Amino acid sequence: MDSVTATTRAARHPNVVLKLRTFAAISGAGFRRYSTYRQATVAGLFTNTVFGFLRCYVLLAVATGTGTGLAAGYTREQLATFVWAGQGMLAVIGIWGWTELADRIRTGDVVSDLLRPVDPVTNYLAGDLGRAGYAVLTRFVPPVLTGPIFFDVHLPARWQTVPLFAVSMLLAVVICFGCRFLVNATAYWLHDVRGVTTLWTLGSGVLAGLYFPLRFLPDWLWGTIWLATPLPSVMQAPLDVLVERDPGPVQLGIVGVQLGWAAVVLAGCRLVQRRAERRLVVQGG
Amino acid sequence: MAEAGAGRAYLALLRGQVRAQASYRVSFVVDLVSNVGATVFDVLSVLVLFRVTRDLAGFGLAEAMVMVGLSTAAFATADLAVGNIERVKHYVRTGLFDTILVRPLGSLPQLLLMDLPLRKVSRVLFGVAVLVAALAVADVDWTPGRVALAVVAPLAGAVFFGSIFVIGASVAFWWIESGEIANAFTYGGRDFTSYPVTVYGGWFRRLFAYGLGFAFVAYHPALALLGRADPLGLPAWVGWAAPGVAVVAATVAAVVWRTGVRHYRSTGS
């Protein structure tokens, strides 16, 4: 078990600075890698913008139809911000379409990940943060600037909202990465992850608050989903922080729940990866 | 003679597909069940919105559900029949499209029959069920004409969505990395047609509803079925024009596809 092939006993230099430098280098590579897909970026941006219009008009019609101008406690302006920031966030958290790990497991390429002196979870997380950083510039900023041109939006009124939202979005990226890693990692046990992927695509859209803000559901149901699954922490939570739907302390509480989910999900990834590696060795892979 | 031969060849392609997909029985059943999921959520979303509000741009739940039913049935049918045309991107990029062109059969029907996703049958059944239930609840004043419209409208809508799928996929002949652009009009169109067009405003409504014709998939046929006047002022007969709009869309799609295929240059080496 001392050989580097079987375990991820990395760090010949248990030096924090070096580790951070490695992490930053992998993130940088992730950033550069996605910056080469220019046409795909433009195409995705166009589609997100069209859906921004569709969703925004529908939610505004809901707010108008209630008679009070409020829909489940959101004003029209808050709903507009919710929709447009949400369309931008979709690409930042990279909610769908990541099958890289599952593909590498299926083809056996994943073995070369184990040879690297960086733990696979850390390695993929670093790459994903780089990807998300690129998406913030190219996929988040444009819809967030487009929305206010065509709709009245809610702008943050409290000074702490913007930094809190930044933290919340970062946590959302980490949680979403963790969920996708776990979905992909089922490939270690199942040969075909299509079923699990379908389930993830379905569940993540609804439970993250993409189709409608989860507060549209009865309170007990929304509360249960929020505490029992990591999905609302992936979209709904940062968006609620941004639109200032709740008083300051609740905003903090939302981020607190996210922090908890980030820890749980990452620990889950570590655990699953370690068990999978043991299994992979048994198989002689 | 040649016609009959081609027909038999298409039939053989279809039969091969059915046999291949049904051979993994458990997997097929799981696919059937999970495939209906997305469509169920789309319909549930509308119900959730009506939990919060009682009125969506002048329409109540029962009326809105007729539109949702028309849209869902039409989209699911088109997605089953032509949805996989999205894969043309892959065929163009890899040069696989060559193998399709060298066969003495139409390129479009071949592509569709080579990969007919039978698992999506469940969505069509669900869509039709929603439509039937909505029409039953919506208190429609049935006349022979309305019965005919209730049958023809979802079919016309399916032809319309099918045309959008083909046009969207044809973009790949000019722009290989066309990515998600087509999604804005296929899935976006489905979302657009699920709600009364009075929900939308300004140039966005003009463009999607009348510029691209999406108002004729569900909104106008639903008004004709419900016997409701259009808040936007268009006359009632517009609902009956939906099949005509579908024919126009299909013609445009055929022209675009043909031009695209002519434009195709193999990847070469």
Image: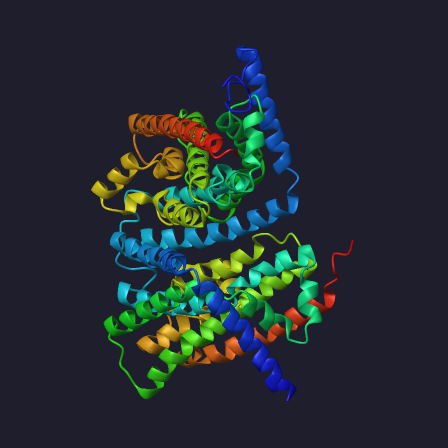
Extreme bottom residue here?
Answer: B1
Residue placed at 50% from the left, 25% from the top?
A122
| A2 vs B232, nearest the viewer | A2
Left or right: A222 as drawn, with respect to B150: left
Residue placed at 29% from the left, 25% from the top?
A249
- Number of dots carrying numbers: 0
Residue placed at 44% from the left, 78% from the top?
B238
Residue B221, percent from left and from top: 39, 75
Residue A228, percent from left and from top: 28, 36
Q: Quadrant of the N terminus of chain B?
A: bottom right
Extreme left residue here?
Answer: A220
| B127 vs B235, nearest the viewer | B127
Residue B32, percent from left and from top: 38, 61
| A198 vs B3, nearest the viewer | B3
**Residue B234 visible:** no
Left or right: B255 as drawn, with respect to A106: right
Residue B78, percent from left and from top: 47, 68
State whether residue B197 is above or below residue A275. below
Left or right: A221 as drawn, with respect to B2: left
| A92 vs B52, nearest the viewer | A92
Residue B192 lies in what quarter of the image? bottom left
Task: Check the image and tell me how it is coloured.
Answer: rainbow
Extreme right residue here?
Answer: B269
Residue B153 lies in what quarter of the image? bottom left
**Residue B144 visible:** yes
